[in-house]
Amino acid sequence: MHTEQQQRAHTLLRSRGIDHALFANPYTVTWLTGFTPPLQHGAGPFVGGPPVVWYEAGEFMLIVIDFYDTAGLTIPVVHYPGNTVDRPIPSADNLAKIVRDFVSRGPSAAKLGAEMRHLPAFLLPPEANSVAIDGWLDPLRMVKTAEELEALRRAFALTDLAHAAARRATGVGAREIEVWTAAHSAAQQAAGGHLPFGNDCVVSYRQNNIGGLPGDLALHPGDSLMVDLSVRADGYWSDSCATYYAAEPSEKQKAMHRVAMQALEFAISLIKPGVRASEIDRKVRGFIAEAGYPVYPHHTGHGIGVSTHEEPRIVPYNSIPLEPGMVIMLEPGIYFPQEAAVRLEDAVLVTSDGAVVLTHHDKSLP
Amino acid sequence: MHTEQQQRAHTLLRSRGIDHALFANPYTVTWLTGFTPPLQHGAGPFVGGPPVVWYEAGEFMLIVIDFYDTAGLTIPVVHYPGNTVDRPIPSADNLAKIVRDFVSRGPSAAKLGAEMRHLPAFLLPPEANSVAIDGWLDPLRMVKTAEELEALRRAFALTDLAHAAARRATGVGAREIEVWTAAHSAAQQAAGGHLPFGNDCVVSYRQNNIGGLPGDLALHPGDSLMVDLSVRADGYWSDSCATYYAAEPSEKQKAMHRVAMQALEFAISLIKPGVRASEIDRKVRGFIAEAGYPVYPHHTGHGIGVSTHEEPRIVPYNSIPLEPGMVIMLEPGIYFPQEAAVRLEDAVLVTSDGAVVLTHHDKSLP
């Protein structure tokens, strides 16, 4: 499990002269190991520090608190004692000691790579010959392994179900939070367990109707609801967006919805190996502008995997060419603040001759 | 808002010779400022670093990405630009520059306090004369302000509602995840918005029936379900536990439930200013043992506030005496792995002459 990722990372680190390394970015940790801690709630003091991965002599090792069950992993794991009732919780000191011991084992001239943007300061040995390696693995994460694709497909299937529940729950009088809980409950019941859940559930009459967590706002006839959903399953996130209507949409809403749908279909038609992210971005923005609508102020799309937004970003500056095995979200939208909003979003897998759509939620007009 | 907290922290920092400081522990940040970012989901790259608080000359200032709305706060806020579609996301560099500028403004001999267990390494200026201040504010957080008590009461009221829904959803055939989604949905619909939610929802026939996230396990006649719930509202967490039954409990379950209830009532009766945490812990463990049951392997209780577990921990080693204004969870339990489990938990506010119970969920036998 995740051995391809470790091999790719090892090749890169060796080529850049890194002798040993500490990874602390939670996305890197999941990508390298398959380990996905439950998202932190309020019990921070029980946890000495973030899960970290130690790299040395071509091998990777996960270091986590003993609270975590790591039975399913194939990577070596070092557990450190965490919570205790017999003395003050020693977990942070235990973690620091393990890291210090690993680092001090090597020759003092050895080059220590460290993800400085996530590694807590107390875990960086001040005497180490350290180099920031933040973002180094991001390009490696773009092309998905077969195992990752399976996890992503499971996650997308769950948001498909969540959207079906959201569509059913939308109607005159329904509140944003009601649609949200219906969608989240449906996904969790289908998965048979707790699922981290995002992103947006907002009525069209909000000032910022592009995104946001659900609130207490109710739908009236003529309102629409933008529902942008992600779940994390086996460490991998889905994403997806649809726009639903309280009742019969107006002519203006129908026209906007049709253009967003055509823009999404157009975006999907552009996907193939070699095409640059910036070109897709430019053409989809152009499509919206030519239809006579204001161009959305956000990205046209983005990669997805252990995080909800990753490379390749489909944005104006990004000249990365697409490659088979990339999984990309595409999400054109049209927004008139406080009045009307539509966004439709699908996931596609880049293949040798085009794209396979991975999301199957109903994005049609009612 | 949160000015009492800032005053207490300032007094402490000055008394220990700290000239300026960087706080990065999310609980500290909420406690000092009232700012509570939504719990992170999968969009890490959009966020340059954690929210941090800068302390200088007796003043506190919040530093966060421009994505966050901080309109309701009274503390000064520095926003740094985050996501952009025009160039690579610069948020981490923007944050680092702000921190460097603040630190370098002071005299080079100035003592910089830093929460090293949470501050990412890239934000600690290597040339600074830095001192670890992790945990320094923990004792100050024990006694709640009037404003904090109000937030805690709101959070407890929401878990009361969640428990009522969980009790209704429990029955033969119900799955852990169904009870969990019913409880979470009820709390969110009452709050009119998204609520972070924890902790445990486990059937009695699990090997580890003390805690864990809900799964796909169904209740049969004779099973019980332990439901331990927390929500975060306005930055403050609730906590609470009850045990529900699929059908009529057995005589053994009834006896265990009654002893747990008596142990909880006994624990509440011990609460008053001056009593040591260790004494409460010892007496409640003794109560369970005298009733002929195995003593629970976890804490007897803990403080609660911006985190779900904080000082004063009600554990054997902890000689902290209670003070008026502390809010304490008490949670005796009895566990027979794979067979039977009961835990009941209430929150109490320590007052000048005893305790006021803050949780009002139904913990009775059916």
Image (tube, coloured by chain):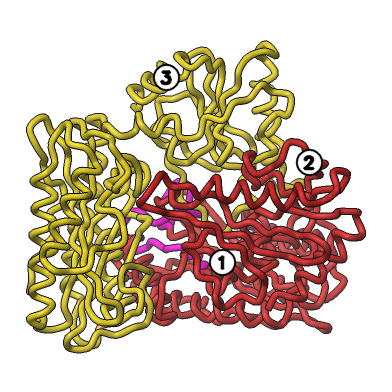
Chain colours: A yellow, B red
At label 1, counting other C-alpha atoms closer than 10 Å, the crowd grade (few under 14, some 14-19, many 20 or more) is many
Secondary structure under badge 1?
loop
Chain ID at mark 3: A
Rendered residue at 76%/67% (across/down): B142
Which label belongs to residue B36?
Answer: 1
Front residue of B35 and B192: B35
What's the magenta region?
B202-231
- Please name the residue that numbered disc 3 is placed on: A12
Q: Quadrant of residue A305?
A: top left
x and y percentages locating residue B185 in the rendered image: 36, 73
Front residue of B202 and B239: B239
- Please name the residue that numbered disc 2 is placed on: B128
Q: Is residue B240 magenta?
A: no
At label 2, counting other C-alpha atoms closer than 10 Å, the crowd grade (few under 14, some 14-19, many 20 or more) is some
Left or right: where B8 falls relative to B289? right
Q: Amino acid at mark 2?
A: Ala
Tag 1 near tag 2, CB within 8 Å: no
The mark lying in front, picked from 3 and 1, is 3
Of the 4 image quadrants, the one containing the N terminus of chain A is top left
Mark 3–mark 1 Cα distance, whole angstroms, equals: 38 Å
Q: Quadrant of residue B127?
A: top right
Q: Amino acid at mark 1?
A: Thr
